[in-house]
Image (spheres, helix red, strand yellow):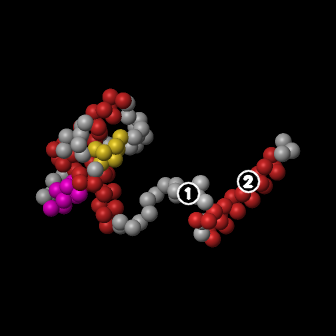
Amino acid sequence: MKHHKFTQKEREELLKNPNISKVLNSNIEFTEEFKQKVLYEHKELGKTANQIFKEAGIPDWLNITGYAKTCIKRWKYQQKHPNKEKRGRPKIEINKPLCEMNQQELIRDILILRLVNVFLKILEPL
């Protein structure tokens, strides 16, 4: 399902399922209860990923490329490493007041402003 953009019809179909909490453009967010249930059934009862997702009412077209198996693998890893930071861009608070910023954040902001100034000086003659 990588890079698949859900249509409005697909989103509506997915949101009807009580195990799905949110559907974005190309991502599905499952409920925590569902994730725990899936991990339990997979480990303790020995059910396959496809079997669990089918019993939960997740549409078959979603699991074309082994989506269920990939989800279970990711959820197992997240369960073993709960404090590990998520991949992707770090969250930066843009409008955080100066009085609430720590020293590292202030230094980072100064460096960013200096880089912007250098960039603007380079652009000025153009």
Residue 40, image x, y percentages: 19, 59
Residue 82, image x, y percentages: 35, 66
Inter-mark Cα distance, 1 to 2: 17 Å
Q: Residues within 10 Å of mark 1 (few under 14, many from 20)?
A: few
Q: Which residues are the magenta region? A: 36-44
Q: Overall secondary structure of the magenta stretch?
A: helix
Q: Is residue 42 left or right of 78 when viewed as pictured?
A: left
Which of the image's four quarters has the C terminus?
A: top right
Q: Amino acid at mark 1?
A: Ile
Q: Is residue 32 left or right of 47 when viewed as pictured?
A: right
The residue that disc 1 covers is: 92
Q: Is residue 27 above or below residue 37?
A: above
The residue that disc 2 covers is: 116
Question: What residue is rendered at 36% in x and 29% in y?
Answer: 8
Q: Residues within 10 Å of mark 2 (few under 14, many from 20)?
A: few
Q: Is residue 3 above or below residue 39?
A: above
Give residue 108's mark.
none
Question: What residue is rendered at 19% in x and 52% in y?
Answer: 48
Q: Earlier in the sequence, mark 1 or mark 2?
A: 1
Which image quadrant is residue 65 in?
top left
The single residue placed furthest to the top in the displayed view is 9
Q: Is residue 102 magenta?
A: no
Q: Is residue 54 above or below residue 70?
A: above
Which image quadrant is residue 45 in?
bottom left
Q: Secondary structure at mark 2?
A: helix
Residue 53, image x, y percentages: 21, 45
Residue placed most toward the observer, 117 or 123: 117
Q: Evaluate whether residue 42 shows in this view.
A: no
Which of the image's four quarters has the N terminus?
A: top left
Q: Amino acid at mark 2?
A: Val
Residue placed most toward the observer, 42 or 90: 90
Which image quadrant is residue 108 in?
bottom right
